[in-house]
Amino acid sequence: MKIRTPFLVVNPKSYLYGKRSLDLALAADKIAKETGIEMFFTCPFADIRYISENTTNVIVTAQHMESLKPGRGMGHVLPESLKEAGAKAVFLNHAENPMTVAELSKTIERARELDIKTIVCADSVSEAVALSKFNPDIILAEPTELIGTGKTADNSYVIETTEKIREMSPNTLVMIASGVTTAEDVYNVIKLGADGTGGTNGILGAPDPKKRIEEWAEAMVRAIKDKE
């Protein structure tokens, strides 16, 4: 599976689950089809099969996984189980669930074996550059202190981060998302060169989360046209 750009990540974390998670996923699925924007949708492990079996246009994304292989490993997150349930991508090393460098490296390799796309989080330009050596599919480069604040990284951060990651790993896509709230925020990061964006509070904190996803997807469409 090749990831189309720009892409949008709808990331409800664990705020939504079960029927409420599926309800937003179905809305995202419809918007992805209507706008043509590549869209990832994260969900709790127990909802992966539920959402995967009821959507066709979003990339169902696990919130974490580990490097273990089938066999011993009670209580850990087995990559094959995620794949079998319908996950096509996974978040790794999020600020709320950090990983050691050794485990992250091994887990990226396991994901590659199973053709599960990796979204690897980094909290600074230097960390993003270091992690790009592992050649993940996507690096989400966001200052941890901006997560959930509604304050976006400045333009120079977006430009510097995308340039440095691409120098180190030309095939790795760059996602900038910290503090993204409005459609103009989305438009700006894509116009400045990021391959994708997304959010949690920026979507769930909106009066109408479904409408917010639609606005963000439409902002991406505008950014694409204005870059041509």
Image (tube, grey):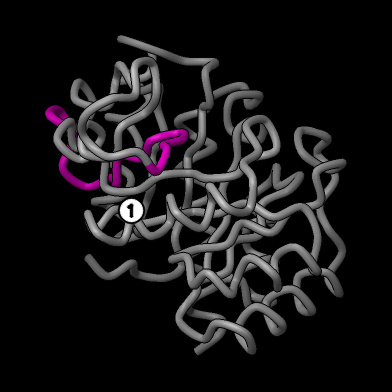
Question: Is residue 29 among the parts visible in the rendering?
Answer: no
Q: Nearer the viewer, residue 8 or 185?
A: 8
Which residue lies at the image location 83% right of the left edge and 57% below the top edge?
Answer: 153
Question: Is residue 10 among the parts visible in the rendering?
Answer: yes
In this rendering, the answer to whether 113 lies above or below 39 is below
Q: Nearer the viewer, residue 47 or 7?
A: 47
Which residue lies at the image location 45% right of the left edge and 81% below the top edge?
Answer: 171
- Relative horizontal placement of residue 168, taking residue 170 as reference (left or right): right
Asked if the stretch drawn in magenta spans residue 55, the answer is yes
Q: Nearer the viewer, residue 181 or 118?
A: 118
Classify mark 1: residues with Cα within 10 Å, few (<14), some (14-19) or many (20+): many
Q: Nearer the viewer, residue 221 or 83?
A: 83
Report x, y in % for residue 184. Answer: 69, 56
Q: Quadrant of the N terminus?
A: bottom left
According to the image, label 1 marks what residue?
110
Report x, y in % for residue 92. Answer: 52, 45
Report x, y in % for residue 87. Answer: 26, 39
Q: Give the total of numbered labels.
A: 1
Q: Quadrant of residue 148?
A: top right
Which residue lies at the image location 20% right of the left edge and 40% below the top edge?
Answer: 83
Report x, y in % for residue 197. Answer: 57, 56
Which residue lies at the image location 58% right of the left edge and 68% below the top edge?
Answer: 174
- Farthest-out residue, front: 72
Asked if the stretch drawn in magenta spans residue 70, the answer is no
In this rendering, the answer to whether 219 lies above or below 225 is above
**Amino acid type assigned to the residue bearing label 1 in the image:** Arg
SS label for mark 1: helix
Residue range corresponding to the magenta coloring: 53-67
Magenta residues: mostly which secondary structure? loop
In this rendering, the answer to whether 155 lies above or below 112 is below
- Relative horizontal placement of residue 9, taking residue 179 as reference (left or right): left
